[in-house]
Image (tube, grey):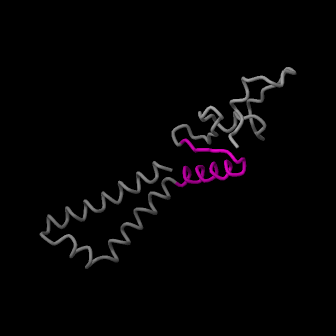
């Protein structure tokens, strides 16, 4: 999510710099141009914002899906854009892929207990409540 807001902020700064450069080139006052064409300036910002949202739509959807999955589990989750996976926080504070957490549907790494119920090796994969 932070990467999306970084793109949005950089795009806004780029629009401001383009308008400022245009004003310097034409010899027009920056604020007078903004107030004169406020509707067009707002429309440009909205179009760029929508374009970035469309380009990041998959990651935004995955981040929202990960957030609501964490809410339903009563666990802290985050979506990693770089790894492309939803991660859940373990009791030790580290994040593991949510599919590796025990007792989740669709989990590919199910550990089988050998009758030892106090095994400490799998306790770090339980979600934080």
Q: Position of residue 10 (x, y in %)?
A: 35, 54
Residue 102 against residue 6 in the figure, above or below:
above
- Stretch in magenta: 57-80
Q: Is residue 12 left or right of residue 23?
A: right
Q: Is residue 68 magenta?
A: yes
Quadrant assignment, res 122: top right
Residue 40 against residue 2 in the figure, above or below:
below
Residue farthest toward the bottom in the current orientation of the protein: 36
Q: Residue at the spot x=72%, y=51% of the render?
A: 72
Q: Residue at the spot x=47%, y=49% of the render?
A: 2
Return the residue nearer the eye: 93 or 107: 93
Dominant secondary structure, magenta: helix
Q: Is residue 75 left or right of residue 56?
A: right
Q: Position of residue 64 (x, y in %)?
A: 60, 53
Q: Is residue 12 magenta?
A: no
Return the residue nearer the eye: 38 or 72: 72
Q: Residue at the spot x=84%, y=21% of the render?
A: 116
Quadrant assignment, res 42: bottom left
Return the residue nearer the eye: 67 or 84: 67
């Amino acid at each position: 999510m932070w990467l999306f807001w970084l793109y949005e902020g950089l795009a806004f700064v780029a629009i401001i710099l383009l308008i400022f450069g245009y004003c310097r080139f034409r010899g027009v006052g920056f604020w007078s141009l903004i107030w004169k064409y406020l509707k067009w300036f707002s429309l440009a910002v909205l179009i760029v914002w929508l374009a970035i949202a469309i380009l990041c739509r998959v990651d935004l959807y995955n981040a929202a899906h990960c957030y609501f999955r964490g809410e339903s589990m009563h666990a802290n989750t985050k979506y990693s854009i770089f790894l492309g996976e939803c991660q859940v926080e373990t009791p030790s504070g580290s994040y593991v892929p949510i599919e590796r957490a025990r007792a989740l549907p669709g989990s590919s790494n199910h550990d089988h207990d050998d009758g030892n119920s106090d095994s400490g090796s799998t306790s770090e994969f339980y979600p934080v409540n």
